[in-house]
């Protein structure tokens, strides 16, 4: 999971840098990539894990 976080940060920073040629915007892009990763984790992965855990607790 840490590898995916690093990938999102690097890609976000690289895209922002090459689009704007600014190091400050590259940092903003890297932060946005990290925030996007955590948003995906919170909205998709966490509820799925919770549903699996509750299903196994009730019927396991």
Image (cartoon, helix red, strand yellow):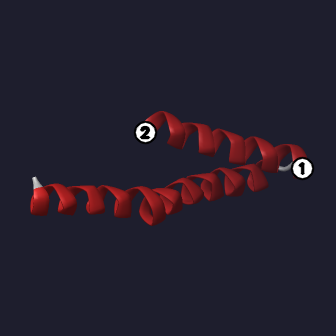
**SS type, badge 2:** loop
N-terminal-most mark, 2 or 1:
2
Residue located at (89% from left, 52% from top): 20
Q: Kindly identify which residue carries mark 2.
A: 1
Residue located at (52% from left, 39% from top): 4
Front one among 21 and 13: 13
Give the crowd class for mark 2: few <14, some 14-19, many >=20 residues within 10 Å: few
CA gap, disc 2 to disc 1?
Answer: 27 Å
Q: Quadrant of residue 28?
A: bottom right
Q: Quadrant of residue 29?
A: bottom right
Front one among 20 and 11: 11
Q: Kindly identify which residue carries mark 1.
A: 19
Indicate the quadrant containing the N terminus: top left, top right, bottom left or bottom right: top left
Residue lying furthest front: 59
x%, y% of residue 33?
63, 53
Q: Is residue 32 left or right of residue 14?
A: left
x%, y% of residue 3?
49, 33
x%, y% of residue 53?
21, 57
Q: Is residue 59 left or right of residue 14?
A: left
Task: Kindly indicate whether the residue at mark 1 contacts the one at mark 2 (C-beta within 8 angstroms).
Answer: no
**SS type, badge 1:** helix
x%, y% of residue 9?
61, 45
Residue located at (16% from left, 55% from top): 56
Q: Is residue 15 left or right of residue 30?
A: right
Give the crowd class for mark 1: few <14, some 14-19, many >=20 residues within 10 Å: few
Front one among 33 and 23: 33
């Amino acid at each position: 999971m840490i590898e995916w976080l690093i990938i999102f940060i690097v890609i976000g920073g690289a895209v922002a840098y090459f689009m704007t040629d600014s190091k400050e915007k590259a940092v903003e892009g890297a932060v946005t990539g990290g925030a996007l990763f955590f948003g995906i984790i919170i909205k998709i992965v966490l509820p799925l894990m919770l549903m699996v855990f509750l299903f196994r607790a009730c019927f396991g």
